[in-house]
Amino acid sequence: MASVGDGRREADPEMPALLEVAGLRKAYGAIAVAADVTFSLALGECLGMIGPNGAGKSSLFNLIAGTVAPDAGTIRFDGRDLMGLPAHLRARLGIVRAFQIPQPFPHLTVYENVLAATSFGAGLAGAEAGHLPLLDRKRLELGKALATGARLLLLDEIAAGLTEREVEGLVALIAEFKVDHAIIWIEHIPHALRAVADRILVLHFGKAVLDGPPSEVMASRVVREIYMGFGTADDAA
């Protein structure tokens, strides 16, 4: 990817995609949580993902991570078709998820938590993880993900519950990780995404309705309509 003035990256046609999602579909009865979702992502790139509750954001993470099987479509990671590959093997390939609510082993130390991630994923250290303040538990969640040798980080609202100053610190940390990782970040704090994301993908009723630069997406009529509850549109302002 080629660098641009604001520290983000512009598409480089010669840079192969690390993650390729094409025509992905998943429905539970009449409710579609993924409706022909297609996008790609390269190393060093952060894709922000937004949408109202029930838009299909977490469901898309489940499909990529392998905890849920799609009805149709393909997911390729570093050129490899992931269809049928279970979640633990995808983690060993480098697809790792960090959750909104940190899930440490509370009675193990920070070191032991990261060691467990290192041992079973890819093959403050003395404090018990259960006693950490929220920001440090968020950092531990990221540390566990990185310890597995992750190449693709799926960040699921990890800034939730933090103060404004803590969000700033977390954003700086994620910006550092982006240099040699691909990141998809679901987040409801717009300025956090604008600070890190190269693109933002908007989901609505399982459909990708917009994918573009953060400033354009956040100012678009599509996003305003979705979040103001007036329905959706097929194009951006």
Image: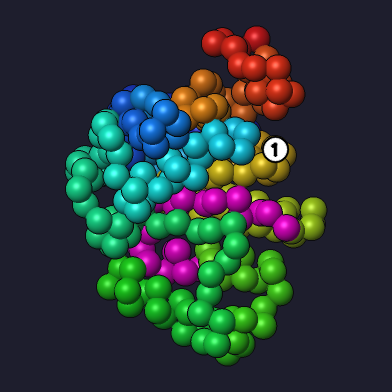
In what quadrant of the picture does the C terminus appear?
top right
Name the residue furthest right: 164
In this orientation, does residue 57 appear? yes
- Percent from the top left, x then y, of residue 225? 69, 18
Quadrant for residue 160, please give it: bottom right
**Left or right of 149 on screen, residue 193:** right
Quadrant for residue 93, please give it: bottom left
- Percent from the top left, x then y, of residue 45? 46, 40
Residue occupying the point 46% across, 50% down: 154
In this orientation, does residue 40 appear? no
Q: Is residue 39 above or below residue 219?
A: below
- Magenta-span inclusion, residue 153: yes
**Left or right of 120 on screen, residue 102:** right
Q: Which range is magenta?
A: 143-161
Mark 1, secondary structure of its residue: helix
How many other residues sit within 10 Å of disc 1, few (<14), some (14-19) or many (≥20)?
A: few
Front residue of 126 and 101: 101
In what quadrant of the picture does the N terminus appear?
top left
List the residue tagged with mark 1: 190
**Left or right of 101 on screen, residue 75:** left
Residue occupying the point 67% across, 83% down: 131
- Percent from the top left, x then y, of residue 55? 54, 33
How many dots with numbers? 1
- Percent from the top left, x then y, of residue 179? 48, 49
How are the residues colored?
rainbow
User: What's the residue type where badge 1 is placed?
Assistant: Pro
Front residue of 59 and 195: 59
Residue occupying the point 56% across, 10% down: 235
